Image (tube, rainbow, N blue to C red):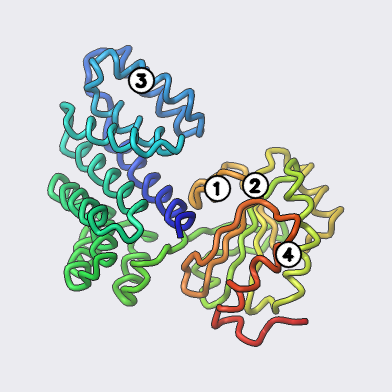
């Protein structure tokens, strides 16, 4: 569950980050500060976290560590460097620093996301997350993602009636199609709000097939994040072939998402190894970013309702991928009695 929460956390953070980039610009009259912040944003977008850290810390010093936008962006950097305490501290600094209500709302939302992701069964943390999302909504009640996040926190606390009101407020704010779809799904089935819903995606495979999570509803989806330069990924190919033979394609879909930069090398490897299932090269990194993929290979199992049920990273020389997935796949109602011997 901790891995699942981390995946969803990254998705929330990207949403909050996009809000900041779209709605906030450095308001300082200092052009050098504004330029540094832009450089920090670019490094962060490029996932060059240590570079972003140095740039943004330097920029923040120009404002005696009270630059709201710098502190907000630093919170995201620290999360990606797996330093949650500093991420939370930076959120608090962003909230207290002079800045717009929109930026304060984004900082409260980010802090709530961090708390909820690490809460587990800690009721105090869940209450803290709810309070942060409530503050985000108060500062910017027209931002649909804040209402959605508050609804999820309320559902985790079994406050279903209050959560439904927030989901309706989210929909009333006319969210983008993906956010709207997620809110409607949770409205129809509140238990999904207590689960880790996979972000929708659309892609065209090497074979020319158009796939989306929405179109694959009802089927189990196994996503294989890999690269040709990754030795464990190359070693897993025979096991993935075995997986495609074990379950019928109308019940289970395997999608391999490559991080390769060189298209020719990727195509040659796929052809040579006869990897005849869905293949996609994630050249711009958007799919990996949406799912929060940081290492290879990583395998995700998504059930027919779009909920991430399993996340595995790396290979285990003592156990095949298929065997490691056996218990998870065996518990899927969509695959009951479908495994081939």
Give the vertical position of 79 relative to 127 (above or below): above
Q: x, y percentage for residue 219?
A: 57, 75
Who's the residue at 22% across and 22% down the image? 66
In the image, residue 36 sits, relative to residue 188, either above or below, namely above
Q: Are marks 2 and 1 in contact (CB under 8 Å)?
A: yes
| Residue 57 x %, y % | 36, 20
Q: Which mark is residue 296?
A: 2
Q: Nearer the viewer, residue 33 or 298?
A: 298
Q: Earlier in the sequence, mark 3 or mark 1?
A: 3
- Residue located beneath label 3 in the image: 57
Q: Secondary structure at mark 4?
A: loop
Give me the C-alpha separation between circle 4 and circle 1.
Answer: 21 Å
Question: Which residue is the site of mark 4?
Answer: 277
- Determine which quarter of the picture holds residue 277: bottom right
Q: Which element is circle 3 on?
A: helix
Residue 238 as seen in the image, left or right of residue 212: right
Q: Earlier in the sequence, mark 2 or mark 4?
A: 4
Other-residue count near label 4 (Cα within 10 Å), few / some / many at <14 / 14–19 / ≥20: some
**Residue 208: where, in percent of width, then height?**
69, 60
Direction bottom: furthest residue: 337
Give neighbour class at mark 2: few <14, some 14-19, many 20+ (Cα, 10 Å). many
For the residues labelled 4 and 3, say whether their Cβ atoms are less than 8 Å apart: no
- Mark 1 = which residue? 293
């Amino acid at each position: 569950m901790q891995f699942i929460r981390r995946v969803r956390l990254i998705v929330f953070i990207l949403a909050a980050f996009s809000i900041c980039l779209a709605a906030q610009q450095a308001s300082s009259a200092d052009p050098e500060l504004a330029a540094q912040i832009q450089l920090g944003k670019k490094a962060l977008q490029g996932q060059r976290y240590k570079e972003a850290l140095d740039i943004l810390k330097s920029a923040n010093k120009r404002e005696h560590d009270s630059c709201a936008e710098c502190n907000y962006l630093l919170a995201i950097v620290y999360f990606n460097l797996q330093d949650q305490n500093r991420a939370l501290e930076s959120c608090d600094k962003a909230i207290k620093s002079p800045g717009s209500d929109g930026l304060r709302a984004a900082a409260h939302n980010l802090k709530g996301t961090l708390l909820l992701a690490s809460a587990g069964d800690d009721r105090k943390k869940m209450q803290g997350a709810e309070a942060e999302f409530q503050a985000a909504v108060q500062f910017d009640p027209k931002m649909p993602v804040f209402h959605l996040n508050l609804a999820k926190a309320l559902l985790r606390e079994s406050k279903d009636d209050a959560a439904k009101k927030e989901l309706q407020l989210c929909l009333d704010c006319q969210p983008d199609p993906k956010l709207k779809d997620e809110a409607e799904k949770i409205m129809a089935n509140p238990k999904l709000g207590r689960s880790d819903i996979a972000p929708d995606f659309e892609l065209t495979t090497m074979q020319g097939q158009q796939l989306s999570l929405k179109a694959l509803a009802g089927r189990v989806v196994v996503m294989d994040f890999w690269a040709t330069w990754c030795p464990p990924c190359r070693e897993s190919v025979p096991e993935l072939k075995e997986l495609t033979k074990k379950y019928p394609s109308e019940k289970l879909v395997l999608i391999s998402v490559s991080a390769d930069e060189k298209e020719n090398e990727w195509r040659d490897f796929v052809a040579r190894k006869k990897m005849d299932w869905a293949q996609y090269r994630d050249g711009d990194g958007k799919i990996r970013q949406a799912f929060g993929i940081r290492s290879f290979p990583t395998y995700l199992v998504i059930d027919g309702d779009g909920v991430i049920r399993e996340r595995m990273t790396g290979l285990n020389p003592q156990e095949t991928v298929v065997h490691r997935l056996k218990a998870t796949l065996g518990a899927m109602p969509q695959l009951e009695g479908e495994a081939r011997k």
